[in-house]
């Protein structure tokens, strides 16, 4: 199974950039597959931004991930 995680673009240098996954987690990502600018939210899979999404959708997905992690910790 594959999944993509929402992240906000915080830097862009040509086709590469830095994305922020929240909680202080930032990583380089290839942005060349999408038309993203600084401030946009993108779905990142294996270091590649594969889709630009709106902020509301990104934050909802992140909330759902946090809920899954919380439930997993509870057993």
Image: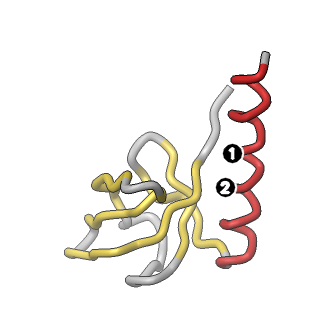
- In percent of the image, x 31 and y 52: which residue is there? 27
Q: Are marks 2 and 1 in contact (CB under 8 Å)?
A: yes
x, y (%) of residue 13? Answer: 20, 75
Q: Please, is residue 69 above or below residue 48 in the view?
A: above
The residue under label 1 is 66
Q: Please, is residue 6 above or below residue 56 in the view?
A: above
Name the foreground residue: 23 vs 17. 23
The residue under label 2 is 62
Quadrant housing residue 62: bottom right
x, y (%) of residue 3? Answer: 64, 39
Q: Is residue 8 left or right of residue 65?
A: left
Name the foreground residue: 22 vs 37. 22
Q: Considering the numbered disc 2 on the image, is that residue within a helix, a strand or a loop?
A: helix
Q: Is residue 46 left or right of residue 26?
A: right
x, y (%) of residue 15? Answer: 28, 69
Q: What crowding class fits label 1: few (fewer than 14 Cα within 10 Å), some (14-19), or many (20 or more)?
A: few
Dot label at residue 22: none
| Quarter containing the C terminus | top right
x, y (%) of residue 60? Answer: 76, 63
Q: Please, is residue 73 above or below residue 43 in the view?
A: above
Task: List the single residue furthest toward the front.
Answer: 74
Colour pattern of the rendering: secondary structure
Quadrant housing residue 14: bottom left
Q: Considering the numbered disc 1 on the image, is that residue within a helix, a strand or a loop?
A: helix
State how many labels appear.
Answer: 2
- In percent of the image, x 65 and y 77: which residue is there? 55
Q: Is residue 21 left or right of residue 63?
A: left
How far is disc 2 from disc 1 in space, using C-alphas? 6 Å
Task: Give the foreground label among 2 and 1.
Answer: 1
Name the foreground residue: 57 vs 72. 72
- In percent of the image, x 33 and y 58: which residue is there? 30
């Amino acid at each position: 199974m594959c999944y993509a995680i929402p992240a906000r673009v915080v830097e862009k240098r040509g086709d590469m950039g830095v994305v922020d996954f929240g909680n202080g987690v930032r990583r380089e990502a290839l942005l060349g597959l999408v038309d993203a600018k600084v401030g946009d939210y993108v779905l990142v899979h294996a270091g590649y931004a594969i889709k630009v999404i709106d902020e509301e959708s990104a934050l909802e997905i992140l909330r759902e991930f946090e809920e899954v992690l919380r439930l997993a910790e509870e057993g």
